[in-house]
Amino acid sequence: MRKLLVYYAILLGVASFLPAVEKPNIILVFTDDHGYADLGCQGSVDDVRTPHIDALAETGVRMTDGYVTAPQCVPSRGGILTGQYQNRFGLESNPEFQDPGVMARFDQVETIAERLKNAGYATGMAGKWHLGPGNEISQHGFDHVFHKNSNAPGQANIDLEGKDVRFGIEKSGLYHIDACSEVAASFVSRYREQPFFFYLAYRAPHVPLDAPKKYLDRFPGEMPQRRRQALAMLSAVDDGVGKIVETLNKNNLEKKTLIWVIGDNGAPLKIHKVDAPGGGPGWDGSVNTPLNGEKGMLTEGGVRVPFVVNWKGTIPGGQVYSEPVISLDVAATAQALAGLPEDPQLDGVNLIPFLTKEKSGAPHDVLYWRWLGQSAIREGNWKYIRSDHREYLFDMETDAEEKNDVLASHPEIGTKLKQRLSTWAGELSPPGIWALKSAGTSRNAANYFDWYIEGKRELQPPVSKATRKPSGPTDATIFQQRNKDNNDEVTWEEFLAGRTEKVEIIRANFDRRDLNGNGLWERDEIK
């Protein structure tokens, strides 16, 4: 039973004896497609303007090696809000957002909001959800909902002034970033007398790029228009963070509030679509400098993100923290600060003792990732990545840009990390290093890794029927054997047929037959 009423009744009894001062407010700001470079405090580029977030870093901590759990927004959000690797409950990639079975499993997992609500916190959110219907957000622990991620009307049960309204269509007419900021600041003022948790999920700088003139005018001069839009949207986000900090200060809450600012994944550079017109797929104007890769990859450019933590008076300011941390740590930290007992279901770590110097060493022995046909592990300075049948090893201490694959010179390290990754992946749903479910994943991954890791600057074009090599009768026989449901297509799982030996060779044979690059071997691909 998801709510675990008896369990939480006990927890409430324990938590009620804790003084309110021991339960800090928690604000989680989660940006969208925000590249690693695009905070002023990162020092990577000189055109971004984020003075308020930079100030949080200056008086708090900038995490140089802060990660999220996936290079895509839906699974990344599932990970940060539950504190679990989302692959454990099958939330592998964006398409699972529409899978009722997967989302039913997500519904059974306690979110940060549910945990804190049961510990006496007021809870609210504004912005992008992407983890089910907007009218069901309150079922995940958020009492106050302002579901708005575009300039179209949103859904809300709280208005811009922080007052309750009947849940329905939101018609504020404000730019969506500004509206979310207003609600967050009003929520802070409303709940200044009790602990609160607010999740502020800006849809920025994710496309469609829609910054109004007042923000665009802050970035004159020659530059790609998409870059100007991204900078403008991030400037709006920064204004919002500034407004929230100002509200905290007015209510004497700055020393009672833990603030996180984290990106949901790397910027989608889209390789050759660097300045595609319009607001559809393509570069969103943000950049990952100096990291290699982009959204949709488990290289650093896909999963290492802007990551700032601030708690004045508790966490010493001016820190640049270089031990690997991950978005899962938000839930584990919140659990501890709320006076709740440690929960083995949480995959993160309470970071506060490490940031206050009460504990030394690295918070994590190892971090893991799996996203469709890619998987990765980071242990200390070593990072091992797989993409379908390819594998790489990088030394993060000397090569954070992942330019020099050293697997050939350190095969024993690669083997050890692969084994550890395989053990972890066996706990996931579905189990295994690969979990291919999305059309075109293998072809896209091949293009990405060719471009960023192999240095091949020509993308692999789609294979036309005219250029296909005919398959022999053996392929036709294999297809018939694997296509047990007679639906004219064979999935990777059907092709694998439960075999556990020589999986890499089997995978390569499957990819050779998947001429359309859509993750399926289709009947019309047999000749």
Image (tube, grey):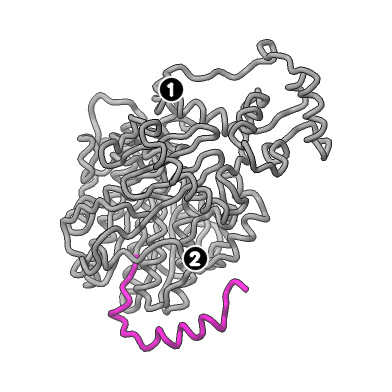
Q: Nearer the viewer, residue 377 or 407?
A: 407
Judged left or right of residue 170, residue 402 is: left
Picture disc at residue 256: none
Is residue 52 in the magenta section? Answer: no
Provide the secondary structure element on which disc 1 rests: loop
Q: Which residues are magenta?
A: 1-26
Judged left or right of residue 42, residue 81 is: right
Picture disc at residue 272: 1
Tag 2 residue: 111
Binning the other alpha carbons within 10 Å of mark 2 as few (below 14), some (14 to 19) or many (20 upward) gives many
Question: Who's the residue at 37% across and 49% down the image?
Answer: 379
- What's the residue type where badge 2 is placed? Thr
Q: Is residue 216 visible?
A: no
Is residue 23 in the magenta section? Answer: yes
Q: Nearer the viewer, residue 292 or 61?
A: 292
> In the figure, 155 relative to 304: above or below?
below
Give residue 507's position: percent from left, percent from top: 62, 33
Question: Who's the residue at 45% across and 84% down the image?
Answer: 12
Q: Nearer the viewer, residue 40 or 298?
A: 298
Examine the image and state in which quarter residue 6 appears. Answer: bottom right
Binning the other alpha carbons within 10 Å of mark 1 as few (below 14), some (14 to 19) or many (20 upward) gives few
Give residue 199's position: percent from left, percent from top: 41, 61
Question: Who's the residue at 40% across and 87% down the image?
Answer: 16
Give residue 503's position: percent from left, percent from top: 62, 37
- What's the residue type where badge 1 is placed? His
Question: Who's the residue at 32% across and 54% down the image?
Answer: 261
Give the quadrant of the N terminus.
bottom right
Q: Nearer the viewer, residue 327 or 144?
A: 327
- The numbered mark, 1 or 2, whose residue comes first in the sequence reads 2
